[in-house]
Amino acid sequence: MSQLFHKSANSISKASIVLGALLVGGTLGAVMIVDRSGYNTRTGTTIPQPVPFSHEHHVSGLGIDCRYCHTAVEKSSSAGLPPTATCYNCHKLIWNDSPMLEPVRESFRTNVPIRWNRVHDLPGFVQFNHSIHVAKGVGCASCHGAVEKMALMKQEKTLQMGWCLDCHRNPEKNLRPREEVFNMEFKAADQLAQGKKLKEDYHIRSEWALTSCGTCHY
C-alpha cells in the first residue's frame, strides 16, 4: 500500500503542535497581563470628579485628619463621604467666590448632595468593612496608598482578589498601632516584629479563617 502522506507531514504536524501550544500559552499570558494591568484594574487612573478635590492640599498642606470627612470609617462598613456642609464649613469663608467650587455652593443652596464618582469600586459580591480593618490596626495607606501626595485621587492598589488574599495570609506587614491608623507618615522601626505582636494583641484570626470565602463573600 502506498504511503498516504509525504514524509514532510511529520515535521509539519510537529511544528503545528508546537505553534498551537505557543499560541494558547501566548493568549493565556496576554489575558493575564491585561487582567492585571491598569487598563482592567484602573490602577493609577484618575477618576474625574465634579470638584477637583486635592488630598495633597487638605491632608499634607492643611493637616486635616481623614476622619474629618470620612466620619463613619471607625464604626461602619463604609468610610462615608462628607456632606456638603462639611466642605462649606471652610469654603463659605475660603475661596468662597472660586468658580471651581461653584458645585459646592450650588449643593449647599439646593440641599442636593454632590455626586462624587467612586474611585475604589469593588464588585457587588465583595464585602469590605472599613471599621473592622481600622479596629485591627490596618492603616489607610495600606489600601489607599499615599493619598497625602495625591493632587487628584486615584486608585493605587489593584483591589484584585490575589492582592486581598496576600494581606489576609500575611497581615503582619500591614498592622500598626490603632492610634497610628490615620497617620499617613507612620513608619515602624521593625514592621514584621511589630506586626507579629499586634496580630496577637488585636486577636487577628487565623489564616484559614481570613482566607475563607465567607469572610469577604457573604
Image: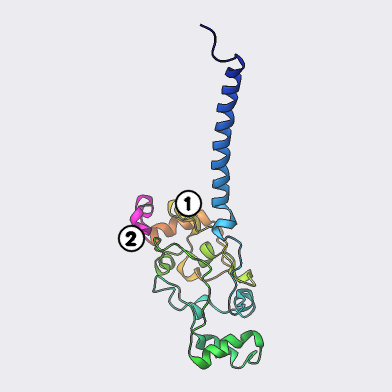
Q: How many marks?
A: 2
Report the side of 113 relative to 99 (left or right). left
Q: Mark 1 points at which residue?
A: 162
Q: Mark 2 points at which residue?
A: 218
Quick one: SS at disc 2? loop
Quick one: SS at disc 1? helix
**Callout 1: few (<14), some (14-19), or many (20+) C-alpha neighbours within 10 Å?**
few
**Callout 2: few (<14), some (14-19), or many (20+) C-alpha neighbours within 10 Å?**
few
Q: Which amino acid does label 1 sit on?
A: Gly
Up-down relation of residue 153 to residue 98 (above or below): above
Up-down relation of residue 201 to residue 72 (above or below): above
Rendering quarter of residue 27: top right
Residue that sits furthest to the front in the current view: 1
The quadrant in which the C terminus is found is bottom left
Question: Residue 92, percent across and down?
Answer: 59, 93
Query: Magenta span covers which residues?
Result: 203-217
